[in-house]
């Protein structure tokens, strides 16, 4: 995929849920319930072993796309258990989720490592969905904007403007992930505007305006309309609520008319 414009995206992050058959059934239900392209992209972030099967199911739906949840920073070789971007490409992935807070925490993924993975994903022609976001203690200290700015600086701001223009950003406050506590629409908007301003400083207004910035953290059918209605919120990265076809379909249809 080449440079993308600002795009409404409802991205599901299945995490380590769904066995193969249940995952394929969910993908099929989403295809069945969302036959029409409403202008937004639905992205399914599935476990590695589901990628090819889901790719086959969504093949006829040009509004439904496929994401991996991680990749190796290495090109290929003796890295037992790792998955390369070339492998992801060969099964039809369009996106790779990078730097999810669970990977940062449980797999010690650093900003520097994520810079390498970002380069690898872009070189393969895939689109990174780059996750950033602060823990509760940082939010309580009021330093969340500086914290997120540092994540972007250390992992993304080495990119050329052209390459940066291909990135999707997902702001996911850690205190809102899987907790049922959602950032208020005002909190999400404030951080998204701050991220966009940072991008404008680094790459100019045109790139900043074209950047897709998703919100993640307890997005549900009940709050998606208000969140997606914020001017700088271009969609969501959705964990728990992406595991049910009805609920994720409602979220996919929560965008304001363009
Ligand atoms: P959640 O997860 O929607 O279950 O809070 C979001 C995420 O981790 O991407």
Image: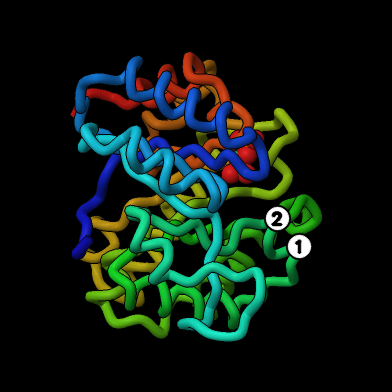
Question: Residue at 27% across / 67% down in the picture?
Answer: 165
Q: Quadrant of ligand 1?
A: top right
Label 1: how many Cα within 10 Å (few below 14, some 14–19, many 20+): few
Q: Secondary structure at mark 2?
A: helix
Quick check: 211 left or right of 249? left
**51 versus 182 height, above or below:** below
Question: Residue at 44% across / 46% down in the picture?
Answer: 214
Please tell me in which quadrant of the rendered image residue 89 appears: bottom left
Q: Are marks 2 and 1 in contact (CB under 8 Å)?
A: yes
Image coordinates of residue 118 in percent, x first then y, are 45, 73
Distance of mark 2 from mark 1, alpha carbons?
A: 5 Å
Image coordinates of residue 205 in percent, x first then y, are 23, 65
The residue nearer to you, when weighing 204 against 90, is 90
The residue nearer to you, when weighing 2 against 228, is 2
Which residue corresponds to mark 1? 105
Question: Residue at 41% across / 79% down in the picture?
Answer: 119
């Amino acid at each position: 995929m080449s440079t993308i414009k600002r795009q409404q995206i409802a991205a599901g992050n299945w995490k380590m849920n769904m066995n193969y058959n249940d995952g394929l059934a969910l993908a099929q239900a989403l295809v069945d319930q969302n036959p029409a392209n409403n202008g937004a992209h639905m992205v399914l972030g599935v476990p590695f072993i589901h990628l090819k099967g889901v790719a086959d199911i969504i093949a006829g739906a040009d509004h439904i796309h496929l994401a991996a949840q991680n990749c190796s920073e290495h090109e290929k070789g003796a890295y037992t258990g790792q998955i390369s971007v070339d492998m992801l490409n060969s099964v039809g992935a369009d996106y790779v989720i990078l730097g999810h807070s669970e990977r940062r925490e449980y797999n010690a993924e650093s900003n520097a490592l994520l810079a390498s993975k970002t380069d690898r994903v872009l070189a393969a022609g895939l689109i990174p969905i780059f996750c950033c976001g602060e823990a509760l203690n940082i939010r309580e200290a009021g330093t969340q904007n500086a914290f997120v700015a540092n994540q972007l600086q250390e992992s993304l701001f080495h990119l050329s403007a052209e390459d940066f223009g291909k990135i999707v950003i997902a702001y996911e406050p850690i205190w809102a992930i899987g907790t049922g506590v959602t950032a208020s629409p005002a909190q999400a908007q404030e951080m998204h505007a701050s991220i966009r301003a940072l991008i404008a400083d680094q790459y100019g207004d045109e790139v900043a305006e074209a950047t897709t910035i998703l919100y993640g953290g307890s997005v549900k059918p009940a709050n998606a309309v208000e969140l997606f209605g914020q001017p700088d919120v271009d969609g969501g990265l959705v964990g728990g609520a992406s595991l049910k076809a009805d609920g994720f379909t409602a979220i996919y249809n929560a965008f304001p008319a363009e």
